Amino acid sequence: MGETTGRVLVVDDDVTVRDVVRRYLELAGYEVELVGDGESALRRFAEREPDLVVLDLMLPGVDGLEVCRRLRVRSAVPVVMLTALGEEEDRIAGLQLGADDYVTKPFSPRELALRVTSVLRRSRVAAARSSSPMLTDGGLRVDVGARSAWLDGRELSLTTREFDLLVFFLTNRGTAFSRTELLSRVWGWEFGDQSTVTVHVRRLREKVETDSARPVRIATVWGVGYRYDGGA
Amino acid sequence: MGETTGRVLVVDDDVTVRDVVRRYLELAGYEVELVGDGESALRRFAEREPDLVVLDLMLPGVDGLEVCRRLRVRSAVPVVMLTALGEEEDRIAGLQLGADDYVTKPFSPRELALRVTSVLRRSRVAAARSSSPMLTDGGLRVDVGARSAWLDGRELSLTTREFDLLVFFLTNRGTAFSRTELLSRVWGWEFGDQSTVTVHVRRLREKVETDSARPVRIATVWGVGYRYDGGA
DNA sequence: GCAGTTCTTACGGACCGCTGACGGATGCCG
DNA sequence: CGGCATCCGTCAGCGGTCCGTAAGAACTGC
């Protein structure tokens, strides 16, 4: 099959390793680019934006960990690290920097190709699911990732607690919660003054209700607590 | 249509060939320059920086191969070679020197025009993909590969950290990040003083915000961290 | 009308982010 | 090798925001 399933950038200073890796990855259907040092890796990455990077830890000049960090600054590209046996600490550091997998030298090229395939599949699934969710209700729109909210088009300035509270309500519509439960699930407290909740609900109402004296969205459930009803 | 789709420099010592080629290329919408020998070709190339060069192999004085080689020293301009039948070796040499296509004499002028169009299209696609990606936002332009940035045309002098931070923000617009997360993804630290982030954001703001006391691009998200909003 | 519950307002302190300054590290130039 | 400039991380002070609490008023259900 001539169809490529992705572009892979291989970074290793050993020509022999590069060639072997190249052959196997190409057999697996990948388009392969090779570079021998960190600077070239970063430059080539910027030019070609490969789908995955195979990165040797030991590199002349900028080392593998630094390359990984710099890549991570501007890309979520999956990285597979090549480490020598016994570089335990480096491996851990690498994974902390966001490497997605690692292979210890000496490695079987077939194994590397398999890992590449598996990491790539994993990251593609993750990417498909990662778009920032938008909560909406009537004229209310909430971007959880951006931590901002709009009511009828104009932006609301909500404090941290208000925002968290609103998000909780929006993701749990139609269910009544006691103040104690809200304290637990929004504040993370297991005990505390319930009036804290009361006051915050009031302040939130001032911002999301058209008439805060006659609330439509956040309903009071007498003797129990509060419930979020749709604003539609 | 009067619009030109590119400038082509034609190098051939035969006046008749030049005129025929010129007519067809102009019909195809190109702006055409004609020269008759190698020295003129190099000089004119330097003056006009055409988008493509049509180059006869047999030239008085500096021959075609040498011209091609000299061009390649300082430009990636696409070259289409004109070769006589049987100049097999020259053709191979030409391609090795970086010619992008060749046409054997006698040739149909229409075929030449088609080849020119096709080479030009190919090279433009390649250029678009290989030029280092530019991040832009409002008056802000960032060349990631070159590690340089401009605001309203004048170059910014950013330090390494500032640059990385800016690139991270530009590639993750509209999402709020905690200082801890920035520390992890830009600094590569898993723990550390959060004020490090605060201070760097401040320094970056001084350089990319019109009024750093009233930031527009890098918004503070109270109790959380920072978010990059468009500067538009 | 009474008791329990919720609403409203006010306030002080805690928290947070901004700022300016400093010392150490690093790299460059003489 | 020594001096200088740059960059970086830390810190303390300050000013502003936010939060939790308390206390009185209003309301609900009985």
Image (spheres, coloured by chain):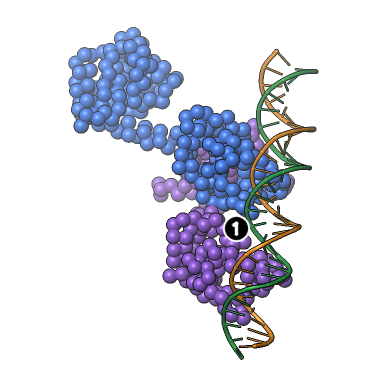
Chain colours: A purple, B blue, C orange, D green
- Return the residue at label 1: A159
Q: Nearer the viewer, residue B32 or B162?
A: B162
Q: Position of residue B6 (x, y in %)?
A: 30, 27
Q: Position of residue B52 (x, y in %)?
A: 33, 25
Q: Position of residue A4 (x, y in %)?
A: 43, 47
Query: Which residue is depicted at the point 42% across and 23% down?
Result: B75
Q: Position of residue A79 (x, y in %)?
A: 58, 47
Q: Chain of mark 1?
A: A
**Looking at the figure, which quarter contains the C terminus of chain B?**
top left
Query: Which residue is depicted at the point 69% across and 42% down?
Result: B196
Q: Nearer the viewer, residue A136 or A34?
A: A136
Left or right of B63 on screen, residue B169: right
| Label 1 Cα neighbours within 10 Å, binned few <14 / some 14-19 / many ≥20 | some
Picture mark count: 1
Element at label 1: loop
Residue B151 visible in the snapshot: yes
**Looking at the figure, which quarter contains the N terminus of chain B?**
top left
Query: Which residue is depicted at the point 47% across and 71% down?
Result: A230
